[in-house]
Image (cartoon, coloured by chain):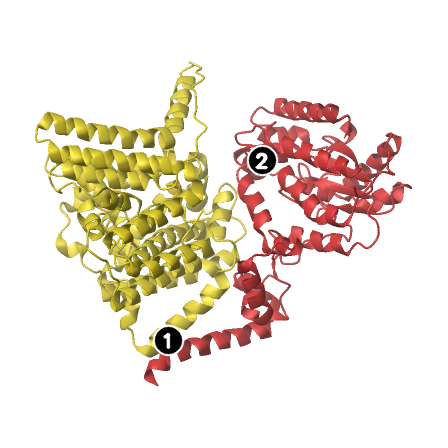
Amino acid sequence: MRRLTVPLLVIALVAGAEAGARRVEHHVPEPLTWDTQFSQDKAAQIEAIGARLDVVFAGSSVAQANLDPELFTDLSPELKTGYNAGLPSMTPTVWRQFLLDTVYREHCPSLLIIGVDIRQFNDNKPGNDGQLYRYLDARGRLNALGDEDFWRRSEDWLESHFALFRIRDRLREPDKVVAWVWDVGEIGDWRNTNLTPEGRYQSNDNRTYQVIEERIAELRDGAFADLSFGGRETDALRAIIDDARERGTEVILVEMPTMSRDLSKALPNGADDQDRFSAALDAVASEYGIVLLRFPEMVDNAVYYSDYYHMNWTGVETLTTLLAERVTTVDLDLGLGVCR
Amino acid sequence: MMAFNSFQYLILLAIVVGAHPLLRKKGQNVLLLAASYLFYGAWDWRFLSLLWISTATDYLVGRGLHRHDGQKARTRLLTVSMLVNLGMLAVFKYFNFFADSAASLLESIGVGADWPTLNVVLPVGISFYTFQTMSYTIDAYRRRIEPTDDPLAFAVFVAFFPQLVAGPIERARRLLPQFNVRRRVAHGDDLATALHLIGLGLFKKVVIADAVAPHVDTAFGSAGTAGWITLLVGVLGFALQIYGDFSGYSHIARGSARLLGIDLMVNFNQPYLSRNITHFWRTWHISLSTWLRDYLYIPLGGNRCSALATYRNLMITMLLGGLWHGAAWTFVAWGALHGAYLALHRRFRGHTRGAELAAPGLRDVAPVFATFVAVTLSWVFFRAATFTEAWDYLTGIVSLRAGAVDRTAVWIVIPAVVATLIIDLTQRRGVRHEAITTWPRLVRGLAYGAAAIAFIVFSGDAPVPFLYFQF
């Protein structure tokens, strides 16, 4: 019997933890199985769209926060349903993969509007590769695509039988578990993506513009350090356009307006870098013969912004309205959005 | 990439461990060599050629040293080995670093220069196996070992998969004879020790290093803006991450080798319980620090010269030790800081006495804590991508910068500190890494149970690569 002391104790402890996990499980949100909560929530929202999807917005947090699909479709008689598939902090390489994995798996939209900003086109941006691999390797994504190997199937089996496995990623943030279950402390950012049903991020809506010097320094030393365009991220933009065209989806590029005069302080060569970026976009647009829209009337007008590139509701409303008006003037063949 | 914490490695190890006892010496060595090349080739088969170049060069140089007694010929042979091994390191690891640094220097004095750079990937483990083979030729040159006449055993010595990509950097005197026995057999004790070492290594890697890693990334990613508590917890987390990651790797390497009846050297010996910096360097990455001592510090004159010359030797050794870790000035700064620590310790304490290297007791809490703080401070330079980031990080802590506290990081890092302390203190008392086997059953059962729960919670994502693979 003494020989069994150690294994019995281990079994008892693990069984106790499993019982505890089962009690806690119903109080905490679903586990995160995609790379980010945004990807996970958006994949679920896109899958739930039953109707035909007419217009899709793609881009980073700037597109995600600043373009409102609901308002856009209200103003566009030909386009009835819209979704904002923008992913914060992600680069075109990830946008493309996300469109292929979610939007194009379920839908063939008539129009794709890509909202681009300079931050996401730096080929040397730190963490680019890690971001892509985290996205590609996320178990939720692989399961959604039906790409399961023995290892993942084993994990799925464990998760389907044991709560300890099911909620383990939540347990890695014990402070939030305590907050959710016992209502002590801050609830944290789980399930706090604050998205509209059409995928727009709405947390900036009531904010007013603020210059934050630390954020400028952070951008200068991070996203804009070692700035270089024209490589893999621009190629990914081209690939997004190619993918859309293959499906008969029209594409419009939008150079998103920003508080350029403040944002330039974070760029190594200031406004010259902005000009180089704009020229690179012009080159891609003319290469493909697609429309590139700019909204100079909104650039550097602080009333529209909550920070250097994200807008408050006044900005979102103005930009989306202007965009809808401009799109109606563009000669587009919106009837071709059919899966080929 | 076949990391120790991957399913593929588990399969490879199971096959090799299963087949190994069925074979005799030559068959065992063929099996180990095939497995080692498969292990390395799984990362990038093209770089197997570098391994082969290093193996062939040092085997032939060894044979040459065996045949030649003349000093001139022997020196020439040693030079060939150094040129080949250091040349590979220079091209694949340091060329772009020195080219960029020279270009920046010239630019700063107004001379613009468009220096060529190489578009090369750093081959995994190149710093480890080149140092291991160089130690073979240097020892053979110094007549400390008899060069082997068995090319198969030598090839396994260079490429032995458990320690190929992140050490320990073994000496031929210790490891090579283990590939020359008639038949290696792992006994019952070996298996029990091996499983404990592998279990402990995986725990340190998955439950300590990987658990704190995202919080360390967040803290260093916001070095210029995060509050001081978040930064402090971040660097404390990195101290645990690098220790858990690297010592965890070493434990798994030793455990894997032990399953095959091979004994690898201890690479970490509770370094954070050191009561001074000299003691720290005798217990941290022991295979590298003894390599640097034997092949760099002592040939420079070691401490058998004037005090100033000794400080110089310490500084040169640590600067090159820093550069060994990576081709960046931040690593050089990390080495310089440790060089300064060692020189200062020597200046004020003289020779490190035997008693200072013994296990610390309760009265040593203050010096152990002071040493840990000094080492942790240096990790800022090791982890930061740039000097600006390191400066922002340190000034953020020192100025008690206001900012939101990453509560999750606190909840993860503090238990990781406790777990690391428990592991190291019990090992210090038990004098061996499998000290847990001597604990009372009740305590052992509770410890294994807690470890199992922690393992379930922190495992499951894609395996996180070991930090030292990049060196």
Which residue is label 1 attached to? B445
> Marks 2/1: CA distance?
53 Å
**SS for dot 2:** helix
Q: Amino acid at mark 2?
A: Ile
The residue located at (22%, 37%) in the rendering is: B59
- Give percent across and percent down for residue B340: 26, 39
Q: Amino acid at mark 1?
A: Gly
Marks 2/1 in contact by CB < 8 Å: the verdict is no
Q: Quadrant of residue A30?
A: bottom right
- Give percent across and percent down for residue B112: 44, 15
Please name the color used to draw chain A. Answer: red
Q: Which mark is residue A216?
A: 2
Q: Rate crowding at label 1 as few (under 14), some (14 to 19) or many (20 or more) other CA atoms within 10 Å.
A: many
The residue located at (69%, 44%) in the rendering is: A100
Which quadrant of the rendered structure holds the C terminus of chain B?
top left
Please name the color used to draw chain B. Answer: yellow
Q: Marks 2 and 1: same chain? A: no
